Image (spheres, rainbow, N blue to C red):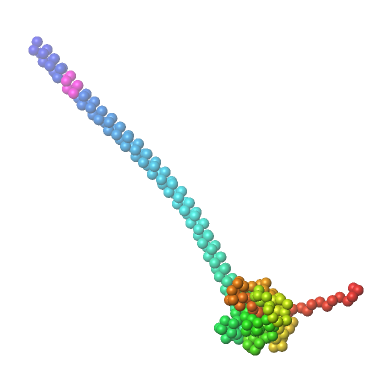
Amino acid sequence: MRTVVVVALVGLTSACVSAGKFRNKAAEADELRAHGAELEAALARTNGELEKRSEEARALQAQVAELSTSRGTLEARVNELSTSKSKLETVKAELEKKSSEYEKMANALRGEIDAGRVELTELRGKMTVKMKDKILFSSGSATLGKPGKGALAAVAEVLRGVDGKVIRVEGHTDNVPLGRGGFVSNWDLSVARALAVVRFLQEAGVEPTRLAAAGYGEYQPIAPNDTPEGRSQNRRIEIVLAPGEALAPAPAPAPAGM
């Protein structure tokens, strides 16, 4: 009897130990499952963050590629502009290059230029000597005065050594109607003054086949005619030297009946 009781107690104790282990293992399993769930959630978050970073990296790569393309385009544009600038500077230098005739004329008329009575310009091989009418003519007159002859003598000295240029003398006036003199209009006066300068240059030794005269009257002003200063600028003689062959004589009229 005692033996049976002992065996029963051992069996009961074994059953209690097994149940405790089971509960411990079950608790451990629950804990492991919870930890695994946390790990899976953390992994999901990490994967999501990685995907976000990957998208950002791809976007940055696209921006870098775009910037690289833009940089190449900009560099090409900069090179193009640099080349264009160099060409423009070359053209500008060529346009502003002064001829030997210009230098000679500038030296011959230095006093008149410094005094503001004469202006000298040159562009594209075309030189212009601009002389205010008051140093050449008195008001309403086409007769050269002594100061004008002195200035024109200096011009003629240079023009005698100029080859391959057409020398055109242009007369210009303001728009004030003539109050006296033997001229019908400012146009007639401008032509007469241009012819007077041409005759003086011819008599001073300038080749007449290269000389021409033109009168523009009031119709090519360089300043407004509503002020005394503007009208003074418009009253002028311009001697223009342009590239070209000697002026050819006008063809003779055909005989009558032909």
Please state the extent of the stretch shown in magenta in the rendering. 14-20
* Residue 14, position as x, y percentages in the image: 16, 20
The residue most toward the top is: 1
Task: Write down the quadrant of residue 149 in the picture.
Answer: bottom right
Evaluate whether residue 135 shows in this view: yes
- Left or right: residue 107 versus residue 168 is left
To which quarter of the image does residue 110 belong?
Answer: bottom right
Is 16 above or below relative to 84? above
> Which residue sits at x=64%, y=86%?
148
Residue 194 belongs to magenta span: no
Q: Residue lying furthest right in this view?
A: 257
The answer to which quarter of the image holds residue 108 is bottom right
Question: Where does the image place residue 17, in percent across and percent down from the top left?
Answer: 17, 22
Q: Against 241, is 45 above or below? A: above
234, 113: nearer the viewer: 234
Secondary structure that dominates the magenta span: helix
The image shows residue 27 at horizontal and vertical percentages of: 23, 27
Q: Which residue is at 50% across, 58% downward?
A: 74
> Is residue 16 found inside the magenta-colored segment of the image?
yes
Position of 181 relative to 82 (above/below): below
